[in-house]
Image: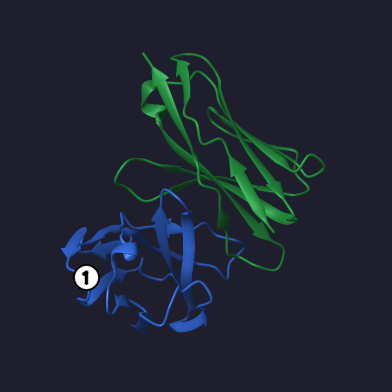
Amino acid sequence: DAGVIQSPRHEVTEMGQEVTLRCKPISGHNSLFWYRQTMMRGLELLIYFNNNVPIDDSGMPEDRFSAKMPNASFSTLKIQPSEPRDSAVYFCASSLASQNLKPQHFGDGTRLSIL
Amino acid sequence: SQKIEQNSEALNIQEGKTATLTCNYTNYSPAYLQWYRQDPGRGPVFLLLIRENEKEKRKERLKVTFDTTLKQSLFHITASQPADSATYLCALISGGSYIPTFGRGTSLIVHP
């Protein structure tokens, strides 16, 4: 079975540019999570969706960040405009959260560098 | 404020020995605790879940303990192998939620 698929794997762009990160969750999973990982702060939850609906976006750092889930098989995380402090690894994860605390399945992340 | 602490220093051990990693937490009452493994350049991979009313959980060479009085979980890998070298993250989940909060992880290096 295919796992969670993220693209691109690496992104290098200049400050001020728009960045779009993409995620395809595992088929059949009803919850999707976006995380950011840095050495300083570890793995932080940015936003999560349940059945394509955003449930909690309190972890989104600023209005420059937005996330969408137009259907059950696709989600995007957008940063506009990007800043150097946004440099991090961004992970997407999915789970069958409604069933007995199933674990999260992570993609391999997008390593984002903002110059 | 809620805090999850994992040793930031890498744990170096010799192959064949038992590795023990620690996860301490404060101002938190988790109902569940998970352990994940993360390899360089990869996402975390789920290993084990333990509930607050369970003292110990085992899976092959892995063993997890959960002491809600000490507010601590220990993660053991017996007969460690170089392939066990990775970063291990603990994650806490409050009752009524399914959203884990992650520690920063501890790096384990097993020397042949």
The relative height of residue A47 versus residue B95 in the rendered view (above or below) is below
Q: Estimate the x, y position of residue A51 in percent, counting from the top left.
A: 47, 81
Check disc 1: other Cα within 10 Å, few if <14, some if 14-19, many if 20+: some
A17 to the left or right of A78: left
Q: Quadrant of residue A88?
A: bottom left
Residue sitting nearer the eye, B93 or A63: A63
Of all residues, the one furthest to the right in this rendering is: B69
Quadrant location, the C terminus of chain B = top left
Q: Estimate the x, y position of residue B85 in percent, counting from the top left.
A: 40, 29
The relative height of residue B103 versus residue B74 in the rendered view (above or below) is below
Give the chain ID for the green colour.
Answer: B
A55 to the left or right of A94: right
Task: State the residue position of label 1.
Answer: A15
Image point (27%, 63%), residue name: A6
Kind of residue indicated by mark 1: Met
Query: What is chain A's hue in the picture?
Result: blue
Quadrant location, the N terminus of chain B = bottom right
